[in-house]
Image: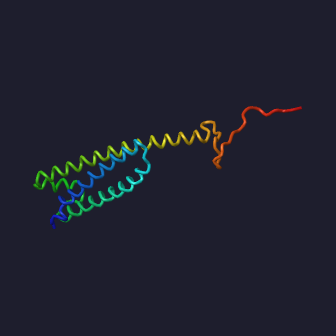
Amino acid sequence: MTASGTSPAHQLQEELRTARTLLELLKEEQAQLITADIDALTALTEEKTRLVTRMSELAAERHLALAAIGFAATEAGMQAWLESRQPEVIHQSWQNLLELARAAKEVNRSNGLLIGKHLNRNQSALNVLKGGPQGQALYGPNGQSSVTAGGRGLAIG
């Protein structure tokens, strides 16, 4: 059952194409995070979700292909299959996929840090609008400014 459509090598090539696309998308996401282009980020997030789902499907298909030819349906099974006299180009493809995965993980980590900075900045802005650390709201629930008089009341008499 090693027809080209079901061999681990075929699955590997599909994974490489998808991983390259995902890495490029993550880099684009990073650029949009830097410029704070929220509309572009929304579209990228949907595409990123689709690509991550596809990567999971391809890995599962690769594992099934490995099992179909008698290898463990794991990364260790992939390594054993590679060591079973596969061409050097397949070894190189596997190494490329692992490198793409490492790079994508790093870009995704950086993107997470950028998102955290945006969240902190937004929270700070909200705190200012709510009155900051004193707890006095500058704007009420109706969107109108609410100013409270400070100091003591006057007693006449």
Residue 3's image quarter?
A: bottom left
Give how far across and how far down residue 157 sits, in percent.
89, 32
Residue 67's image quarter?
A: bottom left
Screen quadrant of the N terminus = bottom left
Q: Residue furthest bottom?
A: 1
- Of residue 84 and residue 131, the one placed in the foreground of this image is 131
Left or right relative to 36: residue 25: left
> What residue is at 18 percent from the left and 51 percent from the top?
93
> What residue is at 18 percent from the left and 53 percent from the top?
79
Q: Against 156, is 3 above or below?
A: below
Give how far across and how far down residue 81 sits, in percent.
16, 56
> What residue is at 27 percent from the left and 61 percent from the top?
60
- Of residue 45 and residue 72, the one placed in the foreground of this image is 45
Q: How many marks?
A: 0
- Of residue 119 and residue 35, the one placed in the foreground of this image is 35
Give how far across and how far down residue 25 sits, in percent.
32, 50
Q: Against 4, is 41 above or below?
A: above
Left or right relative to 143: residue 103: left
Give how far across and how far down residue 109 sits, in percent.
36, 44
> What residue is at 24 percent from the left and 55 percent from the top?
17
- Of residue 33 and residue 64, the one placed in the foreground of this image is 33
User: What's the image's color scheme?
Assistant: rainbow
